[in-house]
Image (cartoon, rainbow, N blue to C red):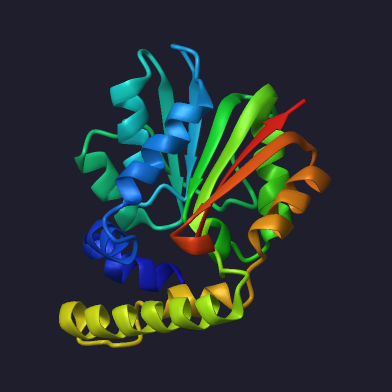
Amino acid sequence: MREMFHRIAPRYDFITSVFSYGMDKRWKQVCVEHAALPANATVLDLASGTGDFSALISERVPNAKTVAVDLTERMLRLARGRGVRYPICADAARLPFASECFDCVLVGYGLRNFKNLNAALREMERVTKRGGMLITLDFFLPVNRVLRALYLGYLYVQGFFWGLVLHGRPRIYTYIPDSLRSFVSIGELSELLRSTGYRTIRACSFLLGGIGLHWAAKE
C-alpha cells in the first residue's frame, strides 16, 4: 500500500477531485466549519496525503498548529512544498504523541486504508483531548443495492481509465472500490466510534451515500 501511494502521490489531488465530481474541497470545508476550532487549536491531520486539511486550517483558524501525519514520505514532501510546517511519517495505529494532546483529529479518505481500523480509532481517541473532536471524511457503499452496484461500477471505470492514462497501470486506482468491499457502513462506523469512547456522534452523507462525514466528540 505504501509503495502504491508513493507512486500516485503527484496525481493524488487530481484523482481525489475526479472521483468526487470536483466536490472534495467543499466537503473538507464543511468538515472544518463544523469543527468550531478555537483560534489556538492543535490539530492532527491524519492520513494527510498532500496536506489539504492542514492548508485549509491554516487559512481559516488563526494561530492553529496542525501536525500532518502520513505513512508515505513522498506525500509528506508534497505537503511540505505547499507550506505544511509539521509533517511526520508515522503509522495511525502507533501514533508518536502523548495522550490528550490534540483539540481535533481530522482524517480524510484514510480509514479504509488502515490495516487495523479498531487500533487506529483507539489511537485517535487516545490523542484527542477531552471535549475534543474526531472528524472523518471517506468513501462508503450506498445502502441501496442498485445504487451500490452503479457506484462501484463508476469507481472501477474511473479508476481503470485514469490508471491507464496517468500511469499505464489500469488497476492502480481500483484500490478505492476494492477497499470499499470490506469497509464498514456509515452507521457501523458511528457505532465503532461510540464503542471507542466518542459521544455526540453526527454523520451525514453525499453522493447518495457514497461519501460520509462523521463528527465525534470525546467526553
Residue 54: x and y in percent read 36, 35
Considering only vertical position in the picture, is 182 above or below 184? Answer: below
Q: Is residue 98 visible?
A: no
Residue closest to the eye, 29 or 133: 29
Using residue 58 as the reference point, say whether residue 141 is left or right of it.
right
> Could you say where residue 74 lies in the image, as x and y percent from the top left?
30, 57
The picture places residue 106, in percent across and down from the top left corner, at 51, 39
- Residue 53 in view (yes/no): yes
Viewer-nearest residue: 30 or 72:
30
Where 168 falls versus 60 (above or below)?
Answer: below
Image position of 7 with respect to 131: above or below: below
Looking at this view, name the residue that lies furthest to the left: 165
Q: Position of residue 64 (x, y in %)?
A: 41, 18
Instruction: Report the label total.
Output: 0
Which residue, as the protein is rendered here, is positioned at the far right? 195
- Height in image: 160 above or below 11? below
Residue ID at (64%, 57%)? 186
Q: Residue at x 33, y 84 (%)?
A: 157
Q: Is residue 123 left or right of residue 86?
A: right
Instruction: Classify residue 131 as left or right of residue 149.
Output: right
Nearer to us in this view, 215 or 167: 215
Q: Residue at x 22, y 86 (%)?
A: 164
- Say which quadrant the C terminus sits in: top right
